[in-house]
Image: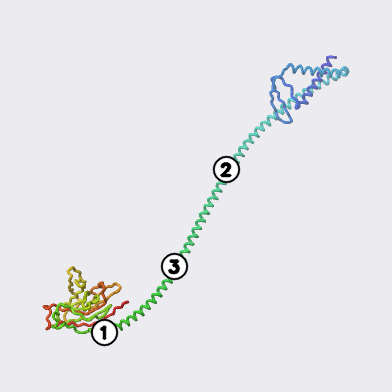
Amino acid sequence: MKKSLKILISSSLLSAAILSSCATTDKAPEEQTPGKKIIRTVTTEQTVTKTRVPKKNTQNTDDTQQASNNADKNSQSNSSSGKAADTPKKTNTTNAKDQQRVAKTDKDDKTAAAEAAASQKGKEVKTSTTTSKDSAEDVAKKKAAEDSAKKKAAEDAAKKKAEEEAAKKKATEDAAKKKAEEEAAKKKAEEEATKKKAAEEAAKKKAAEEAAKKKAAEDAAKKKTDEEKAKQNKATVLDELDKFSEDWTAPAQEVLDPYGYFYTSPEYGQFDLIEGEFTKKSGYNKSAYGFVFGYSQPDAKGYLKDYIRFEINTDGEYALYTWDGKNYKDLVEDNNKGTAYFYEDSSIKSGYNTKNKLKIQADDETKTYSVYINDKLIKDNIPYLKNGTHGVMGFFSVGKKNQENMPDTPVVVSYKITDAVLHSAD
């Protein structure tokens, strides 16, 4: 009886210890067998933690547990000693149920632990898969973000380039527009300047034409006046010169030596043009006659110290030369002999009693003379003599004594002034 009670108490204590252990699984650490790994499952956090527990003194642990068990057994024995003797059968039944409950609880605990471990493993696999998936998604997301950033950077660069090109294009267009406007303005200014210049030139031309027309009218009026005046003057001059229209006769024999000289008429006056008609009736055929002109003032006795002489003879020859008081200078063909020569010309009518016209024309602009025979130009650009005047005289020459046959055949030359223009001091 004593042994059965001890077993019952021991079983009750064991059951209480097992139930106490099951009830505090999540609240207190479990006793571990030294050197083994203990797995503690915390169902509330749904995680599995593996913990390595250091080795403990097995003897001390067993002694402590045994002492605890003995104390519990004594306590239970004291409190239940009165009842144990009365209910031995019930105690056995309770002990069996407790053993079944303990066995079931242990099995349930193992099953729960296995399920928790499987669940935790699945969660770890799922977590690993999720983590892997999340990692791939993060990589894809990162790559997408990088691609997006790259795309945005490319778009921004393209936009910037487009803006720069647009700005450059606009600047070019603005420059072209400005240049076109400047060229248009320049062209307009040039056209206006050309138009203005054309208007000015037209006005100037018109003014010049009007001035020319006015001048022409004035010149025509002046010319007409001059012509009328010249005509009147010519008539007056010719009337005055008509007194020289006579025969010249060589001096009589009472002149000691009349040979080898030339004799002049009185000065006709100062002329810009003079023309005379000459005829030789008798005398030496080589003895010439014509005009002497362009001389400076004669001396007190009437001698000419210089002159230009233009003359013809009955042999159909002419001579043109100057005298400077010492030497002759041929104006037809220059020579170094200081001599003047006669030259034939078909315009001269040869023989006695033939009429030939000699003309002298002065040009104050060029300060030169031109000479004509029967309206044919013989020589022009004959320079004025230094200090020369516009004076003109008619003359004839007498040959040497052995050339003339005086007084039986006197030297006779007649002349008549046919045209004349007085010199104008203007």
Residue type, mark 3 in image:
Lys
Residue 38 visible in the displayed image: yes
For residue 245, what is the image quadrant?
A: bottom left
Q: Secondary structure at mark 1?
A: helix
**Local crowd size for mark 1, using a 10 Å CA cut-off: few (<14), some (14–19), many (≥20):** few
Query: Is tag 3's residue or tag 1's residue first in the polypeptide sequence?
Result: 3
Query: Is tag 2's residue or tag 3's residue first in the polypeptide sequence?
Result: 2
Q: To which residue does mark 1 refer?
A: 240
Query: Is tag 2's residue or tag 1's residue first in the polypeptide sequence?
Result: 2
x, y percent for residue 183: 48, 60
- Point out the frontmost of discs 3 and 1: 1
Above or below 130: residue 60: above
Front position in the image: 6 or 316: 316
Q: Which mark is residue 150?
A: 2
**Local crowd size for mark 2, using a 10 Å CA cut-off: few (<14), some (14–19), many (≥20):** few
x, y percent for residue 128: 65, 32
Quadrant of the image containing the N terminus: top right
In this rendering, would 83 be left or right of 316?
A: right
Residue 356 visible in the displayed image: no
Q: To which residue does mark 3 refer?
A: 197
x, y percent for residue 299: 22, 77
Work out how far the residue at label 3 is from the one at label 1, CA to CA, in angstroms: 59 Å
Quadrant of the image containing the C terminus: bottom left
Residue type, mark 1 in image:
Glu
Work out how far the residue at label 2 is from the one at label 3, CA to CA, in angstroms: 67 Å
Q: Residue furthest left?
A: 402
Q: Secondary structure at mark 3?
A: helix
**Local crowd size for mark 3, using a 10 Å CA cut-off: few (<14), some (14–19), many (≥20):** some
